[in-house]
Every structure is written in structure tokens, then in C-alpha cells.
Amino acid sequence: MYATAAARVVAVVVHLATAGLLVGGLALLLGAWHRGVLVVPGLALLGSGFAVCPRPGRLRPELPVLREPDAPELFRLVHDVADAVGVRRIDLVQLTPECSVTVTRYGLRRTPCLLLGLPLWAAHLPQQRVAALAHALAHLSPRHVRHGALIGTALDSLAVGSGGVRTSPEARLPYGSLAQAWRAGDIVEAERHFNVRGRRSDLAAWAVLWIPRAIASATRRLLIRLTRSATQRAEAEAELAAARTASLDAAVAVLDRHLARATTLEVHRLVVEARTFAGRRPATAGQEDLWAKLARHATRVRADQDTSSPADRKNSPSAPRYTATVTLDASRRRRIEAELRDPQRDVALLVLRDGIAVPAGFEA
């Protein structure tokens, strides 16, 4: 409790410092009408304030966004889960190609939006989908302080401030040219001068901004440390909410990292396969059955997977027993699938066109 209160105080100080940069820079620029020497520090303060000022979140414009009239049965399920968890209802659902279900906030009012990852939705069983929804929506609780408006925006500002000035290895020209190149000596000399000027620029930036960057980095680490206990408790409450809403078995299964890894790699494989045989198949063939193929692959993974450890946890005498309060039966699932058919096809087309980013830990 005291750590969370201290984190809120630190977040207030961060926001006051950001406002001070903006107000101070504006005041110096207004005073520059009489003293032109104030223009440079005024622009520096104003630019720094804008750089670290919290920005409203944005949704990805290329991905489909659903409102309740677009998918009434899906929203009815999401509302039931939100009521069971005890959080506010949401008004938007965006379909994404990631193997996750999360909640993000967008706009100046930080309106929540559910990001529904279609690979996870296709790979998991119906009650596991309910558990994933419950776990994601539980993060709307005020106890998740890192997702709140005060501490969350302060962490975003500090992340920008601590990482805004870094030496980029891409800002260098490859030293040396082919001896056979025309005027190779002049090219090599120009490369050397360019790299020397780049190093001087980096050194000057580091000498000027290393103190504010170090302060921002240390403050961000302090905020993370102060909110660690509250975040761990909130995460445990989210897992408990998933178990109470969808059953303990579903809550344990949806946390299976092995299935998430296998699902992500299979999507990547299907994308490579579709691009390899693009000339031999109709343009719409891949996007029509992408999610069905992924679901069949997940079924095979579950059949081959050794589930002795989760079973021991679920069947142990000390494990609590929960009855699902929200169920996704067959008729409801078919209605949701009919509502998602067209937007799923749109996401599949984007996946097959652009591919997906496989996390480093998922590489085979």
C-alpha cells in the first residue's frame, strides 16, 4: 500500500516536471520578443516537453475494428465476461494477428479496446477463449496500477526520456571501399570524415543529455520497483478471475506457453507456404482456410503434448474448484464464428501479405 502511494507521488512529480518543461519553454519563447537570446533555451525546453509528453494511444488503422452492431453475439459474450469479472464493459474490439488477448487504451479519454488475437482465438477451445477474455478484461481493474492513467502515462513518458538519446550504429557508413571503384580514395576519405563528425555529434549529445536521461531511467526503474508488488497481486487476481469465470482447467490451459509458441510458429510456416505456392493457388484460398488450418494444428499439439504437470496441479486436493460462470456453448460459438467470418478473412489477407513477427524466444 505504501509503495503504491509512493509510486503515485513519483508519477505526479513526473507529470509536473513535464508540464514545467512545456510552460517554461513557452515562457522563454514569449520573453524572446525582448531578448532574442532566450529563443534557443525556450525551443530546447519546449521540444523536450513535447518529446516526453504522454501521447494518446492509437489503434492500428489497417486492422478491422468491431462495434456492438457489427458482432452482437461476440459483444454479448464479452459483456458477460466483464460483468463476471467485475469491470466496466468495452465498446470496441479490434482483431489482431498476434497470439494474445489484451486490452489497450486509445484517445485522449483513454477509452479501453479489446485486442482479440485471432491465432489464440483459433487455437484454443471455447472455454479457454472465455478464460483469455476474463484474464485480459481483469486488467481494467483499478488495482492494475501500471495500466492506470496516472502511473501508466508516467511510465510512458519516462520510457521516452530514458531512451530518446542513444548512439545508433546505423548512423555510420561502412568504412572502406573497393580499390577498383572510381575515385575510391576520395570516397574512403569522405566516409572517414562523415563518421568522425557523427561521433562528435554523438559525444556532444551524450555530454548535454546524459544527466536528464540518467534521471529518467532511474525514475522509471524506481516506479517499476514501487509497483512490482501491486502488479504481482493484480496479476494473481486476473488469473483467479479467469478461473472463476471459465473454470480452473481453462484458466490453466490458456497460460500454456508451449501452445502459444507452436501456434505462432505454425502461422509463420503457413505464411511461408502460401508465399511459396502463391502462383499455383487462387488468391483467396489461403485466407479462407488459414484459421481452420491453425485450429487443426493446435488440436494435434494438444494431443501430442505431455500434460502431466498441469493435470497434477488441477487434480491436487489443495487446488480450488470453480464452476464456470460464463460458458461458450456450440450454438453461441457458431453465431460468433459467422459474425467474425469477414473480418477474419481481412486479417488473414494482411497476415499472408505482410507476414508476422516471430519473437526471438519462439525461433526453432
Image (spheres, rainbow, N blue to C red):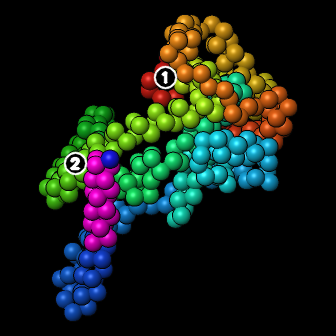
- On screen, 87 above or below 341? below
Query: Which residue is more in the foreground, 85 or 361?
Result: 85
Contact check, label 2 and label 1, Cβ < 8 Å: no
Q: Is residue 182 magenta?
A: no
| Residue 213 coordinates in the image, percent (x, y) | 22, 53
| Residue 324 coordinates in the image, percent (x, y) | 68, 29
> Mark 2 Cα within 10 Å, few/some/many (few <14, many 20+)?
some
Query: Which residue is more in the foreground, 203 or 107?
Result: 107
Where disc 2 sits, the SS reads helix
Query: Which residue is more in the foreground, 144 or 295?
Result: 144
Residue at image point 34% right, 39% down: 229
Which quadrant would residue 153 be assigned to in this image? bottom left
Residue 60 visible? The answer is no
Alpha carbon separation for disc pair 2 and 1: 31 Å
Q: What mark, if any, has residue 218 been given in the picture?
A: 2
Residue 319 visible? The answer is yes
Q: Which residues are magenta?
A: 2-20
Q: Main secondary structure of the magenta part?
A: helix
Amino acid type, mark 2? Ala
Q: Is residue 179 left or right of residue 139?
A: left
Mark whose residue sits in front, 2 or 1 = 2
Q: Is residue 15 magenta?
A: yes
Amino acid type, mark 1? Phe
Residue at image point 30% right, 77% down: 23
| Residue 298 coordinates in the image, percent (x, y) | 66, 18
Query: Which residue is more in the foreground, 149 or 67?
Result: 149
> Mark 1 Cα within 10 Å, few/some/many (few <14, many 20+)?
some
Q: What mark, if any, has residue 362 been given in the picture?
A: 1
Residue at image point 49% right, 36% down: 237
Where disc 1 sits, the SS reads helix
